[in-house]
Image (cartoon, rainbow, N blue to C red):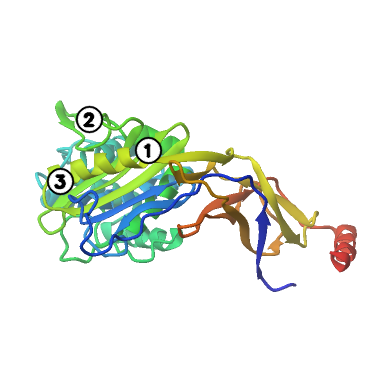
Amino acid sequence: MTGLLRYFAVLPVLALASAAGSADPEPGTVQPFPGAPIALLVDLSSGQVLFSREAERRFMPASITKVMTAFLAFELIDGGKLSPGQSYMMSENAYREWYGKGSRMFLDRSEPVTVETLLLGITSVSANDAAVVLAEGAAGSVDNWVAMMNAKAREIGMTDSHFGTPNGWMDEGRTFTTANDLAVLAREMITRHPDLYRFYFGREGMTYRGIAQANHDPITGRVKGADGIKTGFTNQAGYGFLGSAERDGRRLIMVAATAPTPRDRNDASVAMMEWGFDAFDTRKLYARGGYVGEALVQEGARSTVPLVAAGSIHATFPEGVKATPRLTIRYEGPLEAPLEEGERVAELEIAVEGAPPSRVPLLTGEAVPQANTWQRLVNGVVGLFR
């Protein structure tokens, strides 16, 4: 069996305008979006960073933690391990600790509540009690759920985060994250579970047990195309927000954190999103599912597999700046058969002058079964002349 190598293929492209991603501003310069000491803006369709300030700095996410709880629930739902129609009861321990504590749905021990309702409470009104009831019901205990949260964070590449609670309540700093990691979380949630994301996020609020509560999302309803995601606040953490919006097939993800007041956070969030859409243009490179290239396969019924775009892929660039981006397919291979259609096996790197290269995922365009004896022989002969 051949050892894994890092493969790449440079793709020819027409001249496009280029993006100049914003690095951390130099000391003494005017600070954009001053209300957010930590700020990050990423174009999901190109993977390009449009603005970054202190994006690697750790901070306490407060209720933004609930995005990881929602994402983990989405993973379990799509994996058939959790159903929105399942019902859980609030335990005595959860009632004693969380009834009347912070933002909540006013859950009571006497009422079974469906997973769907709990998730709506978590995503719409930041219900601390709902996050705990879901954790206990789905995992058997809060500790088990938190362990699953941390395992999932490692799996998706959140390299500088740790979760100590399912809801972000103050825990003496054991729960922490970075803007970069939150952008990874938002990307994975939106790309893996687009239907669940659209159903549960971006609502104006919810009514439960006759109590109407509003969502404090600062951009939905104010920024065209905005559909979430989650605010957070504690006295220790300050005010934060993880947000997203989509216009004409182009989606932006933003983080504003450690703001001193809700107005600072809200103004910075709106301004950052509007600037991201207004100051940059985009050019589509590939449609969702569009053919991008090929990857080598070993022990397969065929020696290559087509690679397709996991989502719409764009190049992002400041208005009026022209350049030719360099597109490179990167993967570790040869890939080993069998392969299923839709597996994430490679990345398209988009490199433009004046900005760090960005990468977006590529999927297998079709299944490749293991080779039979005759196919192995043919592939071996072909390989000698490749």
Look at label 1 and name its amino acid. Phe
- Residue beneath the point at 63% across and 56% down: 329
Left or right position of 172 against 271? left
Look at label 3 and name its amino acid. Asp
- The location of residue 283, given as percent across then percent down, is 53, 39
Q: Viewer-nearest of labels 2 and 1?
A: 1
Disc on res. 277: 1
Decide if residue 137 is in sight here: no
Disc on res. 149: none
* Residue at image mark 3: 264
Q: Earlier in the sequence, mark 3 or mark 2?
A: 2
Estimate how packed mark 2 is, as few (under 14), some (14 to 19) or many (20 or more) residues with alpha carbons within 10 Å.
some
315 or 64: nearer the viewer: 315
Residue 313 appears in which quarter of the rendering?
Answer: top right
Q: Secondary structure at mark 2?
A: strand
Decide if residue 302 is in sight here: yes
